[in-house]
Image: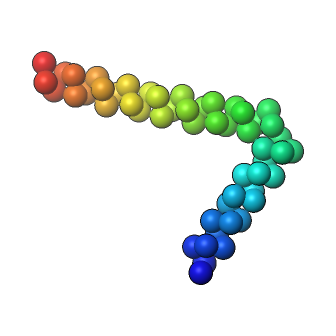
């Protein structure tokens, strides 16, 4: 029950954040995407060096 409520509150906050601060939201998602890309690149380099 609490998990469901927290999920809906999180979704509502996300919609509110995007609606009222679109530039900040874009920067956050861009940064998050860049971080995920860096992590994936690091894993790729690790496994390449592990096999080679």
| Residue depicted at x 66% and y 73% | 5
Q: Quadrant of the N terminus?
A: bottom right
Indicate the colouring scheme. rainbow
| Residue depicted at x 41% and y 32% | 39
Residue placed furthest toward the bottom: 1
Q: Position of residue 47 (x, y in %)?
A: 22, 28
| Residue depicted at x 60% and y 32% | 31
Residue placed furthest toward the top: 52
Residue placed furthest toward the right: 20
As displayed, is residue 15 above or below residue 38?
Answer: below
Residue placed furthest toward the left: 52
As displayed, is residue 45 above or below residue 31?
Answer: above
Q: Position of residue 12 (x, y in %)?
A: 75, 59
Q: Position of residue 22 (x, y in %)?
A: 81, 37
Number of labels in the image equals: 0
Q: In screen coordinates, is 22 left or right of 48?
A: right
| Residue depicted at x 69% and y 58% | 11
Q: In screen coordinates, is 22 left or right of 8?
A: right
Q: Quadrant of the C terminus?
A: top left
Q: In screen coordinates, is 52 left or right of 19?
A: left
């Amino acid at each position: 029950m609490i998990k469901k409520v927290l999920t809906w509150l999180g979704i509502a906050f996300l919609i509110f954040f995007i609606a009222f601060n679109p530039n900040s939201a874009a920067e956050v998602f861009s940064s998050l995407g860049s971080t995920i890309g860096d992590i994936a690149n690091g894993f790729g380099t690790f496994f390449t060096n592990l096999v080679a």
